[in-house]
Amino acid sequence: MSSITFLTAFTGGILSFLSPCVLPLVPVYLANIAGASVLTPALADRRHIFLHTISFIVGFSLVYTALGAFLGLLGAAAPQEVLEKVAGALLITFGIYLIAATKVPWLNYEKRLNFTIVKGSGYLRSLLIGVIFSLGLTPCTVPIVGSILTLAANAQKAWLGVYLLLAYCLGLGLPFIAVGLAWGSASRYIRWLSRHAFVTSVVAAVLLISVGILMLTGYLDYLSGLMPGGYQYGQ
């Protein structure tokens, strides 16, 4: 499992960052965690931005990895064969939802939590904003996160659930760091990517549907076993 599903989870994190629900709001997140100075033409303190962004990433990683560990343990209570079929079907469903959401407006309902309710200052506030970020329900990220959590349950081990969600958080967090450190030159690329963000939903949908089909047909274990260090379900 380790090779293919780690890459799937990591890619899912990157696609979540590039999604229409997250990418256009990156300036808002950066301003909330590192201060409004990142939105000005003046060169912001890169160390300041980096450390606050790390705190933000730690915040959402704590939530996601805890969920991964819980679902990994929960999955151990179900038969492996049943879990694989259910997980495959859910991944395909999530993929279809992402495609449908680009065409059906009411599927794009989302709830955004207000960062102003966060109490505290400094790095603690950035960490709490990361926690809130992980709890915000968006139509673009829920199917991707749900798919990674489904893989975590199918792994049937707490440490594998944590492993998968850490891969997802790494894929989601690294772009935040990169954009924060290169904000002046990156802002125009953010705007361009935002205008074409629907492509991200399609790519994510294809990825989820493909992995779902591999799970339903039993080929995911087969391919994992062929890769160096591959871990097969049920081992």
Image: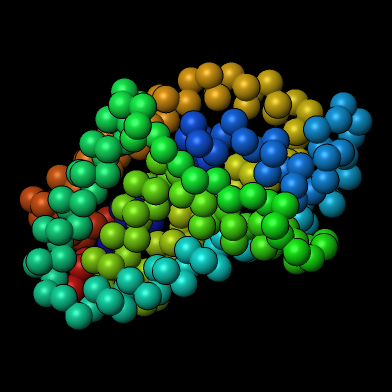
Quarter in which the C terminus is drawn: bottom left
Residue appearing at x 62%, y 36% in the figure: 25
Residue appearing at x 9%, y 67% in the figure: 81
Give the residue at the far right of this rendering.
42
Query: On the image, which quarter does residue 221 sit in?
Result: bottom left
- Name the one closer to the observer, 224 or 92: 92
Residue appearing at x 55%, y 68% in the figure: 62
Residue 17 as seen in the image, left or right of residue 221: right
Residue 76 shows up from this direction: yes
Residue appearing at x 70%, y 57% in the figure: 117
- Name the one closer to the observer, 133 or 215: 133
Residue 124 as seen in the image, left or right of residue 207: right
Q: Percent x, y for residue 29?
A: 68, 44
Residue 1 as seen in the image, left or right of residue 216: right
Query: On the image, which quarter does residue 2 sit in?
Result: bottom left
Q: Percent x, y for residue 210?
A: 22, 41
Quarter in which the N terminus is drawn: bottom left
Colouring style = rainbow
Residue 2 as seen in the image, left or right of residue 117: left
Q: Percent x, y for residue 9?
A: 39, 52
State whether residue 119 is above or below residue 89. Answer: below
State whether residue 144 is above or below residue 82. Answer: above
Count of numbered circles on the image: 0
Q: Percent x, y for residue 131?
A: 59, 61
Residue 7 shows up from this direction: no
- Name the one closer to the observer, 104 or 78: 104
- Name the one closer to the observer, 57 or 8: 57
State whether residue 215 is above or below residue 202. Answer: below
